[in-house]
Amino acid sequence: MPEEKIFFQSGGLKIEGLLHQSEGEGAVVVTHPHPLYGGNMHNNVVHSIINAYQQRGFTTLRFNFRGVGLSEGDHGQGIGEQQDVKSALTYVSGLGKSQVDLAGYSFGSWVNALGLAGFDNVKNLIMVSPPVAFIDFSFLGYNPKIKLVIAGSNDDIAPPNMIEKMLPTWNPEAEFMIIPGIDHFYWGGTDQVESIISNFLDKY
C-alpha cells in the first residue's frame, strides 16, 4: 500500500506528512535533516528508514518540519520542531498504534533527542548520524529508549570516534553500527542503513 499525503496539527500549524498504514501494533515516526540546508522528508536516508520499517509491517509517518514544503510556519531552532515530533507521535497513537518508535537522521536525530524525555509513548529511538560535531549534544543523558545509532566511517559531522565517547552516557547497551567508507550523506550507503535497521527490528 503506497503512502498517502496527510496533514496534522502542531501548535496551530498545519504539518505535511506521508503516512503508510499497516495492520499491526507497531509504528515509526521519522524526522529529516536540517531544513536550512535543504533537508526534507524526501531525503534518501529518511526513505531507507521508512523502507526498513514498512518491510517489517510497521505503520510509518514521515513529515516536513514547520516551514518546509507544505508545512506551515517557520524554522523553530529545534524548539518548534520538538512540538512537530510530539504532534506526529500523538497522531500515530491516535491510529491505535501502541508500539511507536522514533527515528531521525542528522538534524532530525538531534530534535528527537532534545524532546525524548517528553515523548512518553516512544518505545525505541534510532539515531542516524547524530550531528555531534555540528550541534551540542551535551544535554543528552542516559535514556534506555536509545537503542541504535548509525554513522558512516567518513562522517565528519557525526564522527564515529566522538559518538563512541558519548554513547556510554546515552545508553551503554545501545548498538552502534559504523558503515565503512560512507560520509554524512550516505550516497551508496542507504542499503546498509536499511539492512542494519531491518536486523535491529528482527530482535523486537
Image: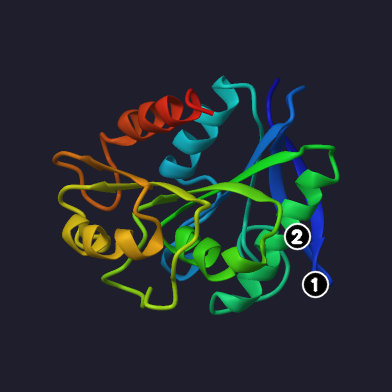
Secondary structure state at the residue bearing disc 2: helix
Residue 146 in picture, x, y percent from top left: 47, 52
Q: Examine the rendered structure and indicate whether residue 108 appears above or below residue 194.
A: below
Residue 105 in picture, x, y percent from top left: 44, 53
| Drawn side of residue 68 relative to residue 151, left or right | right
Label 1 or label 2, whichever comes before in sequence order: 1
| Drawn side of residue 171 relative to residue 85, left or right | left
Give, as a three-letter code, the residue at label 2.
Ser
| Drawn side of residue 201 relative to residue 154, left or right | right
At a point 14% along the width and 41% down the height, the residue shown is 181
Residue 160 in picture, x, y percent from top left: 20, 55
Asked whether the viewer can see residue 148, the reply is yes
At a point 54% along the width and 61% down the height, the residue shown is 112
**Toward the viewer: 66 or 203?**
203
Residue 87 badge: 2
**Toward the viewer: 14 or 151?**
151
Q: Examine the rendered structure and indicate whether residue 146 appears above or below residue 115.
A: above
Residue 185 in picture, x, y percent from top left: 30, 49
Secondary structure state at the residue bearing disc 1: loop
Give, as a three-letter code, the residue at label 1.
Gly
